[in-house]
Image (cartoon, helix red, strand yellow):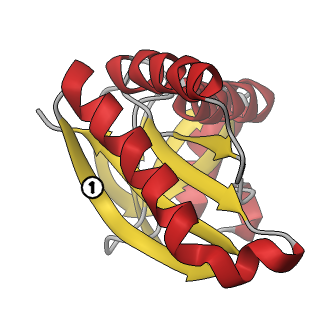
Amino acid sequence: MKTPLINNRIRAEKVRVIDEKGTQLGIMDLKEGILLAQEKGLDLIQVTEKVDPPVCKIMDYGKYIYKEKKKEKEATKGHAGGLKVIRLTFGISPHDLETRVNLAEKFLKKGYKIKLELILRGRQKSLADFAKTKVNQFVESLGALIQIKVERELKKELGRLTMIISKNH
């Protein structure tokens, strides 16, 4: 989080002021806004600099920082659109494949995207075609349970095969 400008650190000459109750007080000189905030024992905090004149709010600086951090935390909490990695191995058994398919289905239903990963070690790198059949087998099994959309096609990168899948709405 970028620390907001407060009181004398605000660089604009004129500011649009909003008081602690959320009422717009209009555009005024910066000094006038700071005086108004100090009379109430609060700070003048620049909320946005994207507009001209910048919007400033009269409130307690500590409370403002607390609320912003809380908002940031809430925003990162939501997992919809998040990415879960499901790792397959070269010699995965049919039962383990089925378990991973069920796990992938749960993640997709919760709104996650899935990054499917199959790591190739040593001689396995020369048998990439066999590895691709394992990944395709996984995708077909998953496709039978839930409608899926391939976000990114199967591609080879740094000794592994990866693919990104999401739920088709």
Splitting the image into 4 quarters, where does residue 30 fall?
A: bottom right
Residue at the spot of label 1: 150
Which residue lies at the image location 62% right of the left edge and 43% below the top edge? 85
Report the number of numbered marks: 1
Q: Nearer the viewer, residue 78 or 83?
A: 83
Q: Nearer the viewer, residue 80 or 77?
A: 80
x then y, percent, for residue 34? 63, 51
Q: Looking at this rendering, what residue extends furthest in the right direction?
A: 122
Instruction: Work out whether residue 27 can be spotted.
Output: yes
* Rendered view: 169 above or below 49: above
In terms of secondary structure, where does tag 1 sit? Answer: strand
Q: Identity of the amino acid at label 1? A: Val
Which residue lies at the image location 75% right of the left edge and 68% below the top edge? 120
x then y, percent, for residue 165? 36, 48
Q: Looking at this rendering, what residue extends furthest in the left direction?
A: 169
Instruction: Work out whether residue 13 can be spotted.
Output: no
Which residue lies at the image location 80% right of the left edge and 29% below the top edge? 62
* Rendered view: 111 above or below 25: above
Q: Residues within 10 Å of mark 1 (few under 14, many from 20)?
A: some
x then y, percent, for residue 115? 53, 50
* Rendered view: 163 above or below 103: below
x then y, percent, for residue 162? 54, 64
Q: The C terminus appears in which quarter of the rendering?
A: top left
Q: Nearer the viewer, residue 71 or 126?
A: 126
